Amino acid sequence: MTTLVTGATGFVGSHVVEELLGLGEPVRALVRDPNKADRWRQRGVEVVVADVTDPQGLRAAVRDVGVIHHCAAAVGHYTKQQFYAVNLEGFRNLLEAVRHAGQPRVVFLSSINVLGTRNLDPATEETPCRRSNDPAADVKIEAEQLALEYSQRHGLDLVILRPGFIYGPGDQRNLPKLVEAIRRGTFRYIGSRNHVVPIVHVSDVVQAMVRAARVAAARGRIYNITDGSRTTIGELADHIAGLLGCPPPRKTIGYALPFAACVMFEVLTRLKLYRGVSPIQRPALRFLGTSRYVDIRRARTDLGYTPLVGYREGIAATLRWLEEQDHGRTAVASPVV
């Protein structure tokens, strides 16, 4: 039966489509931008041009599908209202459409960022969620609650995956920011270079999603998805610097200063006294300023998930892809710190 992928032209969604095509499975892609639809049509993918905020379009998209990989989400610089309109209400629209579509399995891509900005060792699926004043993370908490509500009240077949920091070819936001900060010499450790970072290559995320779609016992369950390692931010930064041929970062700043700056710019933005992009934001504060080791034993046991890509090979391959995209120069976004 056909598998629907929402957010099919995005970072993770495009990799899911490629994997399913490689497995010879029929794929339907939900695409928001019609200008990006031809990429999949030329590969034999059935394309529905619609948005998750369009209930009618979603009803057409979910018709006669057996599995839905929900990757569509607002990411980047959006307002709180925009995050909630797409990532929560859009998800609600999808679940409502699913209620009347023969009960396909829905694999929902959440994030371990629902656990908040704090040190975790280990973080398990039983660790309580905690808000962090980061709309992109906080809305995922409500989306997870919504998924569980539909599962319990309406009997929907849902699986929730919580990946860590996803990187790999196609990544235009996560790793490029870190790479640029290291290349420019503007990178600073926050608190310690020994903080554990919960990273995962996109191909392993896709592996987990495909497995979650097939394992009957996964219904109604939550799974953490990382590479299972205790890779530190220091190890990661040193490796990136070595690949770039530049000096590794050495400077460390305390947590209090970037936290205060983060809060200050949030207040100024809310009061409309500042309209730019804050030099330090909650996601960077969480990634650099906390140590988070994530337990993936449940995914290993239930799904048969086994991480296949370590950070050393994964980072090197991603940097090669970034260089190819910019004709020999690393294509990057604004620095993390």
Image (cartoon, grey):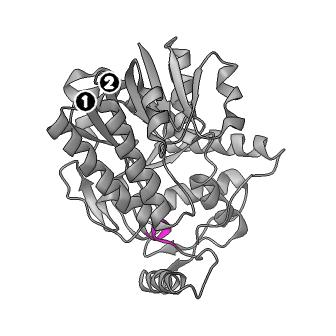
Q: Looking at the picture, does residue 12 appear above or below residue 277?
A: above
Mark number for residue 88?
none
Quick one: SS at disc 2? Answer: loop
Spot occupied by residue 263 in the image (x, y as percentages of width and height): 45, 83
- Residue that sits furthest to the right in the current view: 327
Choose top left, top right, bottom left or bottom right for residue 208.
top left
Callout count: 2
Q: Do callouts 1 and 2 mark residues in contact (Cβ within 8 Å)?
A: yes
Pointer 1: residues within 10 angstroms few (<14), some, or many (20+)? many
- In terms of image quadrants, where is residue 215? top left
Q: Against 252, is 101 above or below?
A: above
Please state which amino acid type lies under the numbered disc 2.
Pro
- Residue 136's image quarter? bottom left
Q: Which residues are magenta?
A: 281-285
Give the residue drawn at x 38%, y 71%.
Answer: 133
Quarter of the rendering occupied by the C terminus: bottom right
Q: Residue at x 42, y 80 (%)?
A: 255
The residue depicted at 22 percent of the width and 47 percent of the height is 125
Residue occupying the far left of the picture: 152
Looking at the picture, how far across and down is residue 71, in whole percent?
A: 46, 40
Amino acid type for the residue under numbered disc 1: Asp
Which residue is the site of mark 2? 104
Classified by dominant secondary structure, the portion drawn in magenta counts as helix
Secondary structure at numbered mark 1: loop
Q: Position of residue 230 (x, y in %)?
A: 37, 51
Asked if residue 46 shows in the view, the reply is yes
Residue named by callout 1: 157
